[in-house]
Image (tube, grey):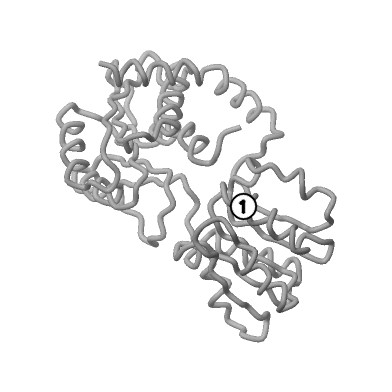
Amino acid sequence: MFGRAQWAAVTVGVVLLAHLPLTTQLPDVITIGGLFDEGDVKQEIAFRYAVESVNRGKWLRPTMLRTMIEKIPPFDSFHASKRVCALVRSGVAAIFGPQSGQTSAHVQSICDALSIPHIETRWDYRLRRDDYSVNLYPHPSSLSKAYLDLVRLFGWRSFCILYEDNEGLVRMQELLKTPSPNEFKVSIRQLPRGNDYRALLNEVKGTLEQNIILDCKTENVGTVLKQAQQIGMMSSFHNYIISSLDLHLVNLEDFKYGGSNVTALRLIDPEREEVRHLMEDWQAGRIMYTSKIQDDDDL
């Protein structure tokens, strides 16, 4: 299965259609620009897949979408602005990416000034969206309210937030500024750097807190839960809310029979027939798209 970034990119074709002018005189070819951080192969594969999926459909016929892809170093706004100018000169109808926050914000301001739609799939804490910007990633304030609703639904009177970086605190903002200070008691602990969390988890265990909200990278979730299990914090008395939207990509088999309740939100339902068909199509074509990227890089 693929994660939120890939899934969001698959929908880019539909988003672009919403920005096309309402006219029956569409050009034969519409060019879509893609800006990708060097080494970000998964995003590029998903982008190519989305565009080709639209071309296989009937939405725009006889008009076809064409991709124009530029690679940029992460966090290099100057290089990104030069690539955007190159895409604009080539007549792109919209620009997708990049993923790094600094360069994406710079690209977004250029697109807004030139009235060019800009599509993103990255986490962005800003409340204001520019007029020509579409971000397929849920806004942090919306996710934060959803976590607050879960806490209230479960009836938690206290909980501990384990977060990895400052972005985690932004995602938990609604839980930290709850109007009623008597509604529940909140404690906050930052996960240490590295991959050994046992000392911190032992501290939490010593407080007798049994309700945990874990905010960390998806690839670290399994490690944190495994170490929590090792010190006896994955029992039937313990409850976890995981902030990652890709928890379905984590192998939770080891925690199946411990009795703890592990809850997370997700953007897609893998059991839906449409999603299954899309994923099968994705898996079948992934090798082809990877080969295309390698061929382009060799040119």
Q: Pick the quarter of the image with the C terminus.
A: top left
**Which of the 4 image quadrants contains residue 276?**
top right
Image coordinates for residue 232, horizontal then vertical, percent: 78, 63
161 vs 18: above or below: below
The correct choice, above or below, for 294 with respect to 127 in the image is above
Q: Quadrant of the N terminus?
A: top right
Q: Looking at numbered disc 1 in the image, what kind of residue is underneath it?
A: Val
Q: Report crowding for label 1: few under 14, some 14 to 19, many 20 or more residues within 10 A (C-alpha).
A: some
Residue 275 sits in quarter: top right
**Is 18 left or right of 280, judged from the image as shown?**
left
Between 287 and 104, the one nearer to me in the picture? 287
Q: Is residue 48 found left or right of 225 in the rendered image?
A: left
Residue at x-position 75% and y-position 76% = 208
Decide: is 205 above or below 96: below
Q: Dot 1 corresponds to which residue?
A: 221
Residue at 69%, 33% in the rendered image: 272
In this view of the protein, which residue sits in the foreground, 110 or 236?
236
Question: Residue drawn at (31%, 51%), measured in percent from left and top?
Answer: 131
Extreme residue in the bottom direction: 182
Q: Nearer the viewer, residue 258 or 110?
A: 258
Instruction: Where is residue 173? Give x, y as percent.
Output: 51, 70
* Element assignment for label 1: helix
Say whether residue 46 is left or right of residue 117: right
